[in-house]
Image: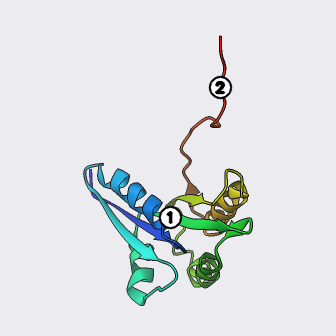
Amino acid sequence: MSDISIVIASHSGYGHTAQIATAVADGARSIAGTQVQPVDVASLSDADWELMDAADAIIFGTPTYMGTASGAFHAFAEASSKRWMTRAWSDKLAAGFTNSGSMSGDKLHTLQYLSLLAAQHGMLWVSLNLLPGWNTTTS
């Protein structure tokens, strides 16, 4: 099996999303042959764009602010339109994560936003295949 290249493209306003990005990277690196590169979407270089273009998968990460992704992440998404025009990310794997200061906070909307961004690029969204949390039953 050949090496797999993953870029974690994320923004972290207060450090919480960066902690999740680190955990995601550690999990991905635990699979032999997986190379992971973090990219801060708030300060992108040409080399960062090239990393994403060359990657097999891009995992998006952003805090949820006011019911959606952060402004820095939205700016990144808009800037990615150059990749959309050339279909540079078509058929790449995509996934995403978010967090907010409360249990609700409209994180679902942010995840839907991330999956829609991936769909616009022709990427293939990968879920965790988990059932909803916080469901309990006693028998």
**Of residues 24 and 113, which is closer to you in this image?**
24
**Total residue callouts:** 2
Q: Is residue 65 left or right of residue 35?
A: right
Q: Quadrant of residue 108?
A: bottom right
Label 1 Cα crowd, 10 Å radius (few <14 / some 14-19 / many 20+): some
Q: Mark 2 falls on what kind of element? A: loop
How did the renderer colour the structure?
rainbow
The disc, 1 or 2, on the residue closer to the chain's N-terminal end is 1
Label 2 Cα crowd, 10 Å radius (few <14 / some 14-19 / many 20+): few
The disc placed on residue 16 is 1
The disc placed on residue 62 is none
Tell me the residue at 74%/69% (across/down).
66
Instruction: Look at the picture and state if 131 lies above or below 139.
Output: below
Residue 27 locus on image (x, y percent): 36, 51
Residue 62 locus on image (x, y percent): 57, 67
Residue 138 locus on image (x, y percent): 65, 15
**Of residues 94 and 103, which is closer to you in this image?**
103
Identify the amino acid type marked 2. Answer: Thr
**Residue reaching furthest to the bottom:** 46
Q: The C terminus appears in which quarter of the rendering? A: top right
Residue contact between numbered discs 1 and 2, judged by CB atoms under 8 Å: no
Q: Mark 1 falls on what kind of element? A: helix
Tell me the residue at 56%/47% (across/down).
127
Q: Is residue 133 left or right of residue 1?
A: right
Mark-to-mark CA distance, 1 and 2: 27 Å
Tell me the residue at 26%/54% (across/down).
33
Residue 122 locus on image (x, y percent): 60, 65
Tell me the residue at 51%/79% (across/down).
41
Q: Which residue is mark 2?
A: 136
Q: Quadrant of residue 2?
A: bottom left
Identify the amino acid type marked 1. Answer: His
